[in-house]
Image: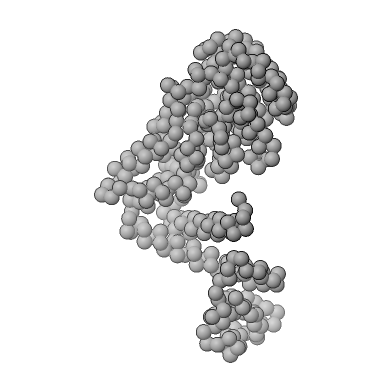
């Protein structure tokens, strides 16, 4: 692509120069004020071909031109997406209504578009919403009471981000374990050497429940400790919490080699992006997920969306600080109904009718950017 800069006393003189030097079919990309009058960025029509991504990068001096082109492309793309949204509302209002319901409840665009595309024909609005509810219920992976992990026993380590509620959740699980197996068959392990007071907090819970407490300074010490607890029916391990992007968060994979099953503890009151990062880091390879802080999540749709897409079984839900009353086996119908109800909340963040075309444009731009990034990573061999 060849883009030239023209400086003239006024726009008319500048356009005349552009036509004279680049031809009548020249394209003016942008104009802006200049100390000498006006500056125009223009290119011959035949030079507007987009370069292949593996070509030599453009010189640093052309970065402003490329940025301007990207801005113009984004504006056009947003407008076209807005038009497409309006056309879709007229052509297929039920599919658009399903997507709006999911977006408002906090579900992501990938799942919303997929479900809307599968909406059966010939439904009215009420039946379409009923279909959506049933599909979400069927696809939310939950373990019922018959598959209660505490009853089966074993070694379980709670992993998750800082502040996700691992220690309090572990105490709730321990109380349930004592009811099922007796205090002498349950053991707690404090393996969080990073957080000040972590072991002290577990000591209080252990004393209240009359169960044994053991401390492991690191994963090597934990590997030596676990064989000594072979006689215990249930061993619950409290691990350090890290941000998903922290390299130390990868250390939790060492638990698998010890015969310990990981349970990802994810707070439902986070933004969707934070939930997705936690799911990718802590949910991969985990035996299940415990969704915490549900009482602080008015719109838990993002958490359910992540569980559905990653197919990670939900084993418990928690909302509140009471031990063990605020720990429950999950009910898919209850969770889906709660999420959809959250989409009807009146908040300053709810989209109005006139906002939806703009939202569609932003979503289209994001999808285009993600697709470009994916192709670029494949070309460069990145992951």
Instruction: Work out whether residue 234 or residue 220 is closer to the camera in this orientation and state it.
Output: 220
The number of discs equals 0
* Residue lying at the far bottom of the rendered structure: 20
Residue 112, image x, y percentages: 43, 47
Q: Is residue 100 visible?
A: no
**Applied colour scheme:** one colour
Instruction: Work out whether residue 153 or residue 143 is closer to the camera in this orientation and state it.
Output: 153
Figure check: 260 above or below 107: above
Residue 157, image x, y percentages: 61, 26
Q: Is residue 262 visible?
A: yes
Q: Residue at x 62, y 58 (%)?
A: 380
Instruction: Work out whether residue 355 or residue 158 is closer to the camera in this orientation and state it.
Output: 158
Residue 163, image x, y percentages: 63, 32
Residue 101, image x, y percentages: 40, 45
Q: Residue at x 47, y 37 (%)?
A: 311
Quarter of the image with the N terminus is: bottom right
Q: Residue at x 35, y 37 (%)?
A: 134
- Relative placement, left or right, of 162 versus 126 is right
Figure check: 13 above or below 203: below
- Relative placement, left or right, of 81 versus 74 is left
Q: Residue at x 67, y 78 (%)?
A: 34
* Residue lying at the far left of the rendered structure: 122
Figure check: 82 above or below 305: below
């Amino acid at each position: 692509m060849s883009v030239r800069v023209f400086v003239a006393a006024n726009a008319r003189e500048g356009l005349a120069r552009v036509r004279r030097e680049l031809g009548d079919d020249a394209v003016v990309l942008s104009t802006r004020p200049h100390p000498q009058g006006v500056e125009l960025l223009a290119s011959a029509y035949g030079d507007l071909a987009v370069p292949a991504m593996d070509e030599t990068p453009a010189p640093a001096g052309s970065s402003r031109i490329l940025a301007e082109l990207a801005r113009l492309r984004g504006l056009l793309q947003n407008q076209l997406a807005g038009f497409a949204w309006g056309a879709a509302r007229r052509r297929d209002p039920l599919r658009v209504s399903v997507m709006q319901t999911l977006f408002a409840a906090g579900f992501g665009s990938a799942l919303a578009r997929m479900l809307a595309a599968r909406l059966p024909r010939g439904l009215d609005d009420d039946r379409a919403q009923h279909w959506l509810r049933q599909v979400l219920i069927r696809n939310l992976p939950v373990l019922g009471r018959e598959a209660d992990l505490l009853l089966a026993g074993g070694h379980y380590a709670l992993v998750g981000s800082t502040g996700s509620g691992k220690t309090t959740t572990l105490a709730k699980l321990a109380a349930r374990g004592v009811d099922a197996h007796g205090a002498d068959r349950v053991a707690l392990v404090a393996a969080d050497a990073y957080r000040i007071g972590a072991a002290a907090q577990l000591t209080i819970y252990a004393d209240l429940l009359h169960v044994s407490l053991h401390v492991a300074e690191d994963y090597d010490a934990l590997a030596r400790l676990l064989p000594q607890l072979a006689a215990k029916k249930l061993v619950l391990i409290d691990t350090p919490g890290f941000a998903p992007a922290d390299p130390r968060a990868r250390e939790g994979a060492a638990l698998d080699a010890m015969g310990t099953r990981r349970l990802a503890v994810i707070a439902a009151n986070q933004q969707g992006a934070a939930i997705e990062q936690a799911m990718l880091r802590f949910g991969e390879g985990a035996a299940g997920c415990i969704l915490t802080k549900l009482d602080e999540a008015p719109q838990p749709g993002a958490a359910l969306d992540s569980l559905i897409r990653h197919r990670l079984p939900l084993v418990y839900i928690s909302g509140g600080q009471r031990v063990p009353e605020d720990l429950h086996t999950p009910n898919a119908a209850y969770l889906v109904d709660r999420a959809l109800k959250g989409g009807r909340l009146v908040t300053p963040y709810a989209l109005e009718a006139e906002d939806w075309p703009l939202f569609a444009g932003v979503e289209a731009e994001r999808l285009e950017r993600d697709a470009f990034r994916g192709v670029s990573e494949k070309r460069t061999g990145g992951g």
